[in-house]
Amino acid sequence: MNPVYIAGAGMTKFGRSEWSLMKLASVASLAALRHASLGEIPVDSVVVANMGAARINHQTALGSALVDQLALYPAMAEAVENGPASGASAFKVGCQAVASGMADVVLVTGVERMRVVNGLEGTDFVASLSQPEVEYIYGVTLPSLAGMFARLFMERFGVERKHLAMIAIKNHENAMENPYAHIQQTVTMEGILTAPEAVVNNPPIAKPLHLFDCCPVSDGAASLVLVSEGIAAKLGGAAVRVAGIGQATDTHAVQEREDPTDLKAVRIASERAFSMAGATAGDVDVAELHDAFTILEIAESEAAGFFDRGTAHEAIERGETRLDGSLPINPSGGLKAKGHPVGATGVAQLVELVWQLRGEAGGRQVKGAKIAYACNFGGFGNNVVATVLRREET
Amino acid sequence: MSDKVYGAKCTSCGAVNYPTRPVCRVCRNEAFEPVEIGGEGTLLTYTEVYALAIDYETRYLRLAIVELDDGLRVTGQLLDDDPEVGKRVKSTIGIVRKPAEVPIWGLQFVPA
């Protein structure tokens, strides 16, 4: 396998956008292409990540559409749909093209425009990833799967609502330093949990999860430029290498998992990514986890190997995952505050990590970060892509 | 419309595949016989969900995963105003969703 480098990263601000699907995708792509400073070097292939455009934006064949917007013909192009893990899946497909020698330059762009539909429609479109016969028909939505997971996990490991609130507080705080974040507003323990008005500020969404345990619904796009070793050398500058990618699947219905609190696909995908990278969880300087729900940041951080099972909430209490802690998690603000345009998320996680590894993350910079990890959690944990990036000195 | 919910019992290893699938999850055999799903069990976990999908006009739904006494775990709607993990429940069959006014029947749980 040939080495793969990330030469450029860009994104739009997440949130509610008036821009069309393709305008979002184009703006993020152009930002990444400018960041890569390709000059006259052509883009060989375009991979677009998206989950719901066919349904909610009435548009298909997004790879071809983006090539046309950016006048990149006759580049190869396709779209990748893999639920909420579409972003990292598209990234993986792009990496495979470079690693195989089939392409020297690949543009990977994740995009989602979800705010055009109402809440019920939006929730239903994401719920369509659940098992149709034994989950979806009962009214299962992603928040409900997270709620049932949270109750089980919290009872088993002694995680309390205050721990979930600590995740929300931390991620909102990190997002204050991220101009691309959907929500830039600090929250306090009083405001969302302990004060009398917290019951109004923070209503239940899927008990025991409340509003501030759930990510917002966002529009947005994020983009990466992947290049071969030859092109990376030509471009010079800071080199971010794709050190490892791991992906794993699990049963479609949560009920069939031997231990429903065990995020087995996160565990296996992470093991595969670390093994390919020749690294361990202990080597990681900064991580972006898929905190669509606060409980997932806790559970994923254990399954990825950063903490022993049932202990992540104690590490959070000690502040270890804060920006100034020993393992900063979600410096971008995570899905919780940065936002979650579903198909864009997996790409946006890696955009943040590229900026972190290049020392370009501004007020949320993790000093001296050399090894970074991302977990893009698809389905309710039934398809997970883990990525390890490494800064190489040139 | 059906007043029963079925899984598929593998004719080789006996595992109940629910959801059904053409290949047994345990032994990869491809022959099954239908088996009725339901009975008594204990509440493994539950939620009261306010973030509902289309087709529901209620304010919230209670959903649960129940571990049936035969060991099978099933998801369904919980008709119990006082749920608790570990509580004994039993299954009934009712209308669980009504897309375009066409009712879908499925598992609901009430206190045993």
Image: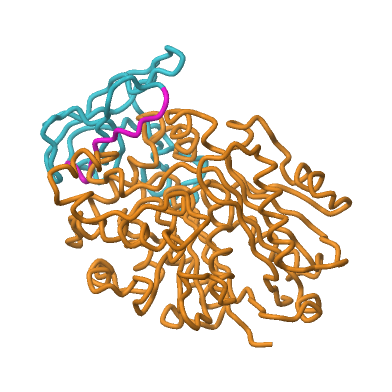
Chain colours: A orange, B cyan
In depth, the one of B87 and B13 nearer the eye is: B87
Pick out the residue farthest to the bottom: A394
Q: Quadrant of the N terminus of chain A?
A: bottom right
User: As drawn, is A199 to the left or to the right of A304?
Assistant: left
Residue found at the far top of this picture: B101
Asked whether, in this view, residue A173 is left or right of residue A218, the answer is left
Could one spot residue A258 in this view of the protein? no
Membership of B66 in magenta stretch: no
- In the image, the segment drawn in magenta is B42-54
| Location of residue A297 in the rendering, given as x and y in whole percent from the top left corner | 36, 60
Q: Quadrant of residue A96?
A: bottom right
Is A355 or A285 nearer to us in this picture? A355
Classify B91 as above or below A51: above
The residue closer to the viewer here, A379 or A39, is A39
Residue at (39% x, 72% y) in the render: A328
Q: Magenta span: helix, strand or loop, mainly?
A: strand
